[in-house]
Image: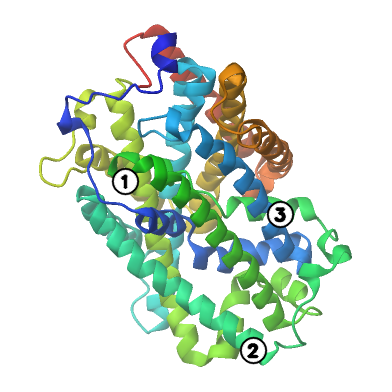
Amino acid sequence: MANQLEDPNAVHVPDRPHRKLRGTLGVWGIVFVVVAAASPLGVIGGPVPLGIASGNGIGFPAIYIVSTLIVLLFAVGFTALTPHVPDAGAFYSYIGKGLGRTTGFGFALVALVSYLALEIGVYGLIGQGAQALFASYGLPDIHWGIWALAAFAVVTILGHRNIDLSRNVLGILLIAEVAIVVVLDAVVIFSGGHEGLSTGIITPSEIVSGAPGIALLFAILSFIGFEATAVFRDEARDPVRTIPRATYLSLILIGVFYAVSTWALITAWGDSRVVEQAQADPSGLLPGATEQYLGTVGLHIIQVLFVTSLFACILSFHNIVSRYVFTLSNRKLFPGSLGEAHANHASPHLASGADSIVVGLFIIGGALIGLDPVTEFYTWLAGISTVGIVVLLIATTVAVLAFFIRRRQSLDVSPWRAFVAPGAALLGLVVIFALILQNLPDLVGGSTPIAVGVVVLLVALFATGAGLAAKRPDVTLE
């Protein structure tokens, strides 16, 4: 098993094409999926006002620059290990390559549930968003669960088909949501804003004011989903080149977009009043600026695109979860039938269907028991995802370091890629993880029992995955 784990040329079941996915994703195709998962418009309307209100105020844009540097340092080691991980599977495959199959499968369940929880949770946001949007046009006030199920039906259909169809849908929605924010940014900047251009981004005293640690927490969470660059390995053209390029390009585009757009949003309100406004009404910060600078038409457009942005986010995470289930089924952790690819679409149709069944049950259950779609349904599930994804980033970085330390006598990459950048990323990620644990009750609606439950659940998932792998030698990472 050890030799199999270390063999960089090992390829999973090459003689079973019905268990291989196909697609024509290039660099930009993968970038669309990754950036759509990040939900740029949703971030500008959600985490950004929260980061301004409870973080470091007008210095928040600089925190996005810092967080971008941390994830780029992570990406250096992540992409250095990519040629040695020839199969799709993303974080847990990388962890297994560096820390062994048992540890890898433990984190496989952590990753799967973390992404599944976020996929389910965002249905709460889109349900409420669609409810408010259509009610504002005079339509009947339909329950959020109905709107969530409508979005669920479309996602299920798209998930059944080839990834190229999802790529096209995501590309259109992503361009639209980014375009409206860029237009707002441009109008605000060229008009000079309410009090002139904000200077918080370059003022050291503002950058370290308030609670910069909390600001860093909100900023780093805005990057969740970039692992998709490796999840779609089997559906990418020339993955050895495509994955690294798509990873760097996605992170740079997301980081620059967030930093500039946050700075423009602060400028729109003015340095002297934006923090007070964000604290009083965080959800109104983006719509208020849009109506002021783009008029009523712009406000209506951004309200519609906010909902479509959430749909794009859900579709991206549905595709990620489906491929996790597909790959883990081919690794014999789940029933093998879920690892069958569609004969015509070459999609993980059965894995996608299994994902949809679980998601559908959660949506119906959450609606029937009367959960609030945002403060309960979304918040509780997002707490699981938040902790899980940061733990995965840390474990992947440790795996990169462990892998290259073992190969230091015959290193095939530079020390910068193998040791320096991953080491620096690990330091930053550990600080972020400590901040998350410290503020976890606030992230899950102010409930300490739920916060404890999140941690216990993730530990149990790791133990289950690792235990299954330890007891079953037929369960392999490759």
Name which of mark 3 and mark 2 comes first in the sequence.
3
149 with respect to 422 (left or right):
left
Q: Is residue 464 above or below residue 169?
A: above
The nearer-to-camera label among 1 and 3 is: 1
Distance from the alpha carbon under mark 3 to that under mark 2: 26 Å
434 with respect to 167 (left or right):
right
Residue type at the position of mark 3: Val
Helix, strand or loop for disc 1: loop
Residue 259 percent location from the top left of the image: 65, 66
Name which of mark 1 and mark 3 comes first in the sequence.
3
Helix, strand or loop for disc 2: helix
Helix, strand or loop for disc 3: helix
Q: Quadrant of residue 196?
A: bottom right
Residue beneath label 1, please?
236
Q: Are marks 1 and 3 in contact (CB under 8 Å)?
A: no
Residue type at the position of mark 1: Ala
Residue beneath label 3, please?
66
Residue type at the position of mark 2: Phe
Q: Looking at the image, which residue is at 36% across and 8% down?
A: 473
Viewer-proximal residue among 40 and 95: 95
Distance from the alpha carbon under mark 1 to that under mark 3: 30 Å
Q: Is residue 412 above or below residue 116?
A: above
Q: Looking at the image, which residue is at 23% across and 31% down?
A: 338
233 with respect to 417 (left or right):
left
Q: Residues within 10 Å of mark 3 (few under 14, many from 20)?
A: some
Q: Are marks 2 and 1 in contact (CB under 8 Å)?
A: no
Q: Is residue 421 above or below residue 85?
A: below
Viewer-proximal residue among 382 and 472: 472
- Identify the image quadrant of the C terminus: top left
